[in-house]
Amino acid sequence: MRNLFVGIAAFLGMTATVAMAEAQTLKMMKALDAPHYDGQRTTWSPTSDIVNMFQDTLVALDWDGKTVIPYLAKSWTVSPDGKLYTFKLRDDVQFCSGKKFTADDVIYSFKRLTDPAFKAPLAWRAGNIKELRAPDPYTVEYELAEPYADLLLNLTMFTTAIHNKESVEALGKDYGVKGADGTGPWCFESWQPRTEIVLKRHDAYKWGPSMYQNKGPVKFEKLSIKIVPEDSSRMAAMMAGQFDVTHQLPLQFIQQVKAAPNLNVQEATPNFQLMYYGYKTSRPMVADKRVREAMNIAINRADIVKGIMLGNAEPAYTFVDPKALDFAQSTKGVIKEDVERAKKLLDEAGWKMGSDGIREKDGVKLAPKVYFTQVGNFGRITEAIQGYMRKIGIDWKVQGFDSTIAFQKMSEQDYELWTVTFPYLSAGDLLNFYFDSRNMPAPNRYNWNDAKTDEDLKLGRAALNDADRAKYYALAQQLVTEEHLMMPVMNVAMYLVTNKKVKGARPHMLYQNTFYKGLDYSF
C-alpha cells in the first residue's frame, strides 16, 4: 500500500511538473512567416513583430500612437535648429548575450543601417545623418545634415532597433536566421521556417518603457510562435484553447470569436492600416494617369468591405486616414466611384474595347499583372476587384505568393500592381515611405521619381513647427493623390485575441504589432 501511495505521489508530482512547464510557455499563433529576422534588411511586418520582441529602440511609442517616450534613451534634447539630438542612455542595459549596452552599439547600429553598400530599404527613417558621436559611454550626439521633423517617431520603429556588432559579424549571412542578439525582453532561441519561432525570457531585463506596469523580466520562460497560415485553423485553435494569443485572426471570424466564452477580443486603437494596390508607374500599361484613375474609380469599396470584411474595415477613398496626423482635407473627393467616367478615361487613353470584352492598344491587351500575398482576405479582395475591372475592359492577371517568397517576387519588379496592408503612424510616415525617389526600388515600388514630390517631402521633413510640416505634407498628398499612384481600398481594423486566462494583454498599433514586448502578460 505504501508503494502505491509513493507511486501516486510520484505520478502527481510528475504531472504537476509537466503542467508547470506548460504554464511557463506563452503560446502564440501568427499567419505569416518572414524570409529572415534582421529588421534592418526589410520592410516586412512579419519580421517587425518578432524583432520588436528581442530588440529595443532608443525610444518607444505610447499607447496613443503619437507620444514618444524614453526607452534605451532615458532622455534627450534637441537643438534650436532641429539638427542635433543628444540622447542620454540608460547605464543598466545588457544584451541577451550578457554584453553591456553602450553608446558604441547605437553608433554601430545606425552606421550599419545607413551604409549605402548595405542598401537598407528603410534607412531613410534614421534621417540624413551627418555625424554620430559618443562623448561618453552613455551619451550619443546624433547630428543631422538637415532637420527631420519625424525623427523621434521613426526611432520607435523596428528598423532602428539596436544591434550587437559581435552578433552581426559572428553570424554573417545567417544573422537573423540562425540567431540575433538584442536587449529586448525576449531572446532569440530558434526558428524553423514556416513552422515556429521560439523566444526565451531575458532574465536580466528590467528596463521596460513606462507604458508597462511590469518593467521586466517577462512572466514566462518561453514564447512559442507557431506559423498557421490557414485562417479557419487559427480560429479553431483559439476557440479550442490550444493557444493563448493571436494577433492576426481573420476579420471575417471576429464576431464569432467575440461570442466565444473563453476568448477576449480587443481592437487596436488608434490604428492606421491601409489595404491598397500600388501602380508601378514605370510599366507602360499603367504609366498613363488616366488608366490608373479609371481603375481607382471603377470599384465599389463599400460592397467589398461589407461582403468580404463583414464590416470590419472602412472603405478608403484617400491614401491617408482622415484621423491621422497631417491628413490633407484637400484630398477628399479626388477618388469618386464612377464606372462611366472610368470607361471614358480608358477610351481617351487609347485603349479600345476588343471583341472579347478586353481593351487593347497597338496589339497589346490591357491585362496588367497583379501580385498579392496569400494571406487573410487578399485573394478574395483581389478576385472581387478583378471582377470590377472586367466590367470596364481590363483583365487583371492575378498571382498569389506565400509570404516567405512574396517579398522576393516583388523585388523582381515584373508586375504592374501589387497589394499589401501598410501600417503607418502619420501622413509624413506614409508619404516618405512610398513616394520619395530615394526609396526606389523599395519601398517606392511605384518608381515615382518626381522633383516636386521630393521637394515637398523634404520641406515637410525639415519643418521646425507643426504648421509648416502639415502644409508641405498636404501639398505632397494632393500631388500623389491626383496622380492616382495607388488604389486605396480600405482602412483595416486590427484585433488582438487572447484566451481569457491571459491577463494584462493590450493591443498596440505599431507596424501591425498588436503584441508589443508582452511585459504585462500573465496567467
Image (tube, rainbow, N blue to C red):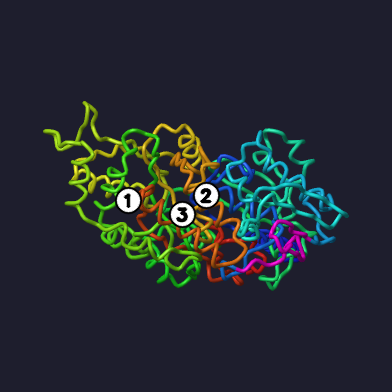
Q: Secondary structure at mark 3?
A: helix
Of label 2 and label 3, which has the lower sequence position?
2
| Location of residue 10 with respect to 133 vertically, above or below | below
Of label 1 and label 3, which has the lower sequence position?
1
Which residue is label 2 attached to?
Answer: 455
Measured Cα–Cα span from mark 1 to mark 3: 28 Å
Q: The C terminus is located in which quarter?
A: bottom right
Residue 514 picture location, percent across and down: 55, 62
Of label 2 and label 1, which has the lower sequence position?
1
Report crowding for label 1: few under 14, some 14 to 19, many 20 or more residues within 10 A (C-alpha).
some
Asked if residue 14 lies in the magenta stretch, the reply is: no
Q: Secondary structure at mark 2?
A: helix
Which residue is label 3 attached to?
Answer: 476
Q: Examine the image and state in which quarter residue 501 appears.
A: bottom right
> Of tags 2 and 3, which is closer to the observer?
2
Residue 356 picture location, percent across and down: 14, 34
Residue 508 picture location, percent across and down: 56, 65
Measured Cα–Cα span from mark 2 to mark 1: 35 Å
**Which region is colored magenta?**
67-87
Considering depth in this image, is 294 or 268 the residue closer to the camera?
Answer: 294
Q: Is residue 200 left or right of residue 511?
A: right
> Of tags 2 and 1, which is closer to the observer?
2
Which residue is label 1 attached to?
Answer: 381
**In the image, what residue type sits under mark 3?**
Ala
